[in-house]
Image: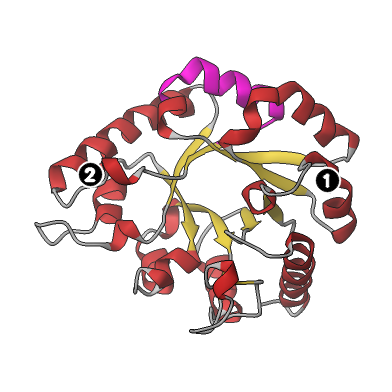
Amino acid sequence: MDFSFQLYSARNLTSITGFFPRLKALGYAQLEGFGGLYDRADDLAAALEENQLIMPSGHFDLDTLKDTAKSMKIAETLGIKRLICPFLPPDRRTDDESGWLALAETLAGLAETYRAAGFGFGWHNHDYEFRPTRSGKLPLELILDTAPALEWECDVAWVVRGHHDPIAWIERYAERVTAVHVKDIAPAGTAEDEDGWADVGEGIVDWTRIFAFIRRKTNADLFIMEHDNPSNVERFAKRSIEYCQALGAKGK
């Protein structure tokens, strides 16, 4: 199994591309991009080629995704095959079901456009999609049920932080799960300087069980390591891939 590294985890480094040789040496074959990198897409593509890395997926904010020609050009430059909408700003979130339905309809239309052009297109969750609307329905189910062509990049740790069982959600939408964010949550009261996140395998998420379930029940082909605020990004990258490779070697 090849693992990707979400470059957002390294956003605080002086040079993200300067970290590419170390990621390659640690065993990463793939990277996932995010919006802040795309202004110099040609330079980023050159750095990927120089380090024999690929970028099969990338995060694009909703406004950029609506400019489909621009987003497709970036994707083609970087070799991105799957575009992911990762976030909805707080001022666009609502407890009114109609707001989420409108978003879902927008995503459904974009999914059709990108798929027709040969790209995958999906949604990446946080915890706010698990806060009920006034109708009692959850934003994530509204999004996925209204936009059937939309893939789901499941961020397991955010599901847990949303007080839901990731296994149940993955089983419910198994055919839609094409990518997984592999991240971990530190035990309560620890890692406060890292916003309560942990290196994969060092936290409370049962990745042994979850990995086995994902591989058995879904066709997910992208497994992306992420830590939202690591105090030492190289430590996170090293510990996490070593843990996940060991799981794979055990056939988990």
User: Which residue sits at x=49%, y=68%?
Assistant: 157
Residue 30: percent from left, percent from top: 74, 47
Res 210 visible:
yes
Give the percent coordinates (x, y) of residue 120: 52, 36
Q: Is residue 182 left or right of residue 104?
A: right
The prevailing secondary structure element of the residues shown in magenta is helix
Local crowd at mark 2 within 10 Å, few (<14), some, or many (≥20)? Answer: many
Which residue lies under the disc numbered 2?
Answer: 100
Q: Quadrant of residue 202?
A: bottom right
- Amino acid at dot 2: Trp
In-image side of 193 versus 247 (left or right):
left
Separation of disc 2 and disc 1 at Cα? 37 Å
Question: Looking at the rendered structure, which numbered label has been put on residue 20?
Answer: 1
Which residue is nearer to you in this view: 240 or 54? 240
**Tags 2 and 1 in contact by the CB under 8 Å rule?**
no
Looking at the image, residue 100 lies above or below residue 195: above
Residue 62 found in image quarter: top left
Give the magenta range: 66-82
Q: Residues within 10 Å of mark 1 (few under 14, many from 20)?
A: many
In the foreground, 145 or 140: 140
State the mark number for residue 101. Answer: none
